Image: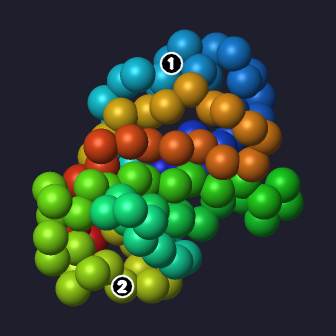
């Protein structure tokens, strides 16, 4: 699924999207806007919907991909696999246990 489609689905129907994506394995593709590390977890931010500032954040445990910083490229489409988290706020959609799969 693309970041655009995931955000559109949530904008159309929040509850059904949580049922459809929450707790499910997702393969998501989007443009990497930035990334940061906190306590061994790398948050990779994928560009979302500029109209409502929605963001998709893929959470990567650095122990599962120690060389992740060498692989990421800003402004490039990347594909990630992880588990959808139920949406907790109006701005961010989290994908946990992510793995970077490539460009």
State the residue in front, 47 or 40: 40
Residue drawn where x is 52% and y is 65% of the image: 45
- Residue 28, position as x, y percentages in the image: 39, 49
State the residue in front, 57 or 52: 57
Disc marking residue 20: 1
- The mark tally for this picture is 2
- Residue 16, position as x, y percentages in the image: 64, 14
Q: Is residue 39 above or below residue 69?
A: above
Q: Is residue 84 above or below residue 68?
A: above
State the residue in front, 83 or 10: 83
Q: As drawn, which residue projects farthest toward the right?
A: 51
Snapshot quadrant of residue 11: top right
Residue underneath mark 2 = 73
Disc marking residue 32: none
Residue count near mark 2 (Cα–Cα under 10 Å), binned few <14, some 14–19, many ≥20? some
Sooner in the amino-acid sequence: mark 1 or mark 2: 1
State the residue in front, 21 or 89: 89
Callout 1: SS: helix
Q: Quadrant of the N terminus?
A: top left
Q: As drawn, which residue projects farthest toward the front?
A: 39
Residue 29 seen from this side: no
Q: Is residue 26 above or below residue 23?
A: below
Residue drawn where x is 30% and y is 43% of the image: 97
Callout 2: SS: loop
In the rendered structure, the answer to whether residue 37 lies left or right of residue 46 reads: left
Q: Is residue 15 above or below residue 45?
A: above
Residue drawn where x is 51% and y is 55% of the image: 57
Residue count near mark 1 (Cα–Cα under 10 Å), binned few <14, some 14–19, many ≥20? some
In the rendered structure, the answer to whether residue 71 lies left or right of residue 14 reads: left
Q: How far apart are labels 1 and 2 at the CA level?
A: 30 Å
Residue drawn where x is 52% and y is 44% of the image: 94
């Amino acid at each position: 699924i693309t970041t655009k489609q995931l955000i559109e689905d949530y904008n159309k129907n929040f509850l059904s999207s949580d049922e459809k994506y929450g707790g499910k394995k997702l393969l998501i593709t989007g443009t990497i806007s930035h990334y940061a590390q906190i306590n061994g977890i790398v948050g990779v931010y994928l560009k979302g919907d500029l109209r409502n500032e929605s963001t998709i954040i893929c959470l990567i445990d650095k122990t599962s991909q120690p060389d992740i910083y060498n692989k990421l490229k800003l402004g490039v489409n990347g594909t990630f696999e992880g588990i959808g988290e139920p949406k907790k706020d109006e701005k961010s959609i989290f994908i946990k246990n992510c793995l970077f799969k490539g460009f």
